[in-house]
Amino acid sequence: MSFVSVSAALLLSLTVASPDPALSSSSYEELDAPVEWQLESQGPRWSVPIVHTGALFFGMRGVEAYLWPDPFAVSRPSVWLSNYRAAYSQPPIFELDRRPFEWDRDHWTINVIGHGLLGSELYFRPRHCGADWLPSFVFAASASAVWEYAFEANGVRPSGLDLAYTPIAGILLGEVRYVVHRAASRVGNPALRGILRALVDPFGELERAAGAPC
């Protein structure tokens, strides 16, 4: 999503610099601004990020079970109990003798790209729903821990790299998405504005179309 955000930012610089002459300055102020502008004075809506994250995690866990049935599709209670016991009694996996960003035994693309995008989604959703950057970062870090210790721990031990990298990458990529999304909302052309928003926040656009408040 980060490369999409950069492309969108370049397009925005041209679009915002050449406003539609048919629209007055007051008309731009009346455009369909993102809901985080309206929520800044009302406080964040945490229900949306919580439900969004839960749905995201269940979906991801299902994809994991399909792509890597061993260990993620194993459903024997005894195996789950043993894995959870190991997760909560041993430190997270972090093996420094491995290649950079493969310290948890996963390929670096899963860690750098996959968890970077996951972190940005965990951070961006509360940010878009009215939260400041620090609560959004705390939410991303907490959600990452829930993913590692609740959703994945019945298959593998938590990853020390993922616990640290996911929220850090999340605040960096997620804040870029947040800024670009706000800029996209200033675009005068409704069709272009909608396309840019969808590129920056595809899941959010689908959820808002289904009735989510932010």
Image: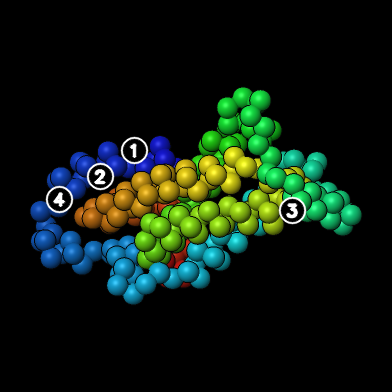
> Which residue appears at 44% of the width and 71% of the height?
45
Q: What's the distance in space between the residues labelled 4 and 2, CA to CA?
A: 11 Å
Q: Which residue is mark 2?
A: 12
Q: Nearer the viewer, mark 3 or mark 1?
A: 3
In the image, is 40 to the left or to the right of 158?
Answer: left
| Contact check, label 4 and label 2, Cβ < 8 Å | no
The type of colouring in the image is: rainbow
Question: Which amino acid type corresponds to the residue marked 1 in the rendered image?
Answer: Ser
SS for tag 1?
Answer: helix
Of label 4 and label 1, which has the lower sequence position?
Answer: 1
The image quarter in which residue 92 lies = top right
Please rate how many residues cluster around mark 3, counting C-alpha atoms within 10 Å: few if below 14, some from 14 to 19, many from 20.
few
Find residue 64 and name its label: none
In the image, residue 59 above or below residue 26: above
| Contact check, label 2 and label 3, Cβ < 8 Å | no
| Contact check, label 4 and label 1, Cβ < 8 Å | no
Question: Which amino acid type corresponds to the residue marked 2 in the rendered image?
Answer: Leu
In the image, is 156 to the left or to the right of 189?
Answer: right
Q: Which residue is mark 1?
A: 7
Please rate how many residues cluster around mark 2, counting C-alpha atoms within 10 Å: few if below 14, some from 14 to 19, many from 20.
many
Question: Which amino acid type corresponds to the residue marked 4 in the rendered image?
Answer: Pro
In the image, residue 198 above or below residue 106: below
Residue 203 on image: x %, y % = 49, 55
Which one is in front, 173 or 94? 94
Q: Which residue is mark 4?
A: 19
SS for tag 3?
Answer: helix
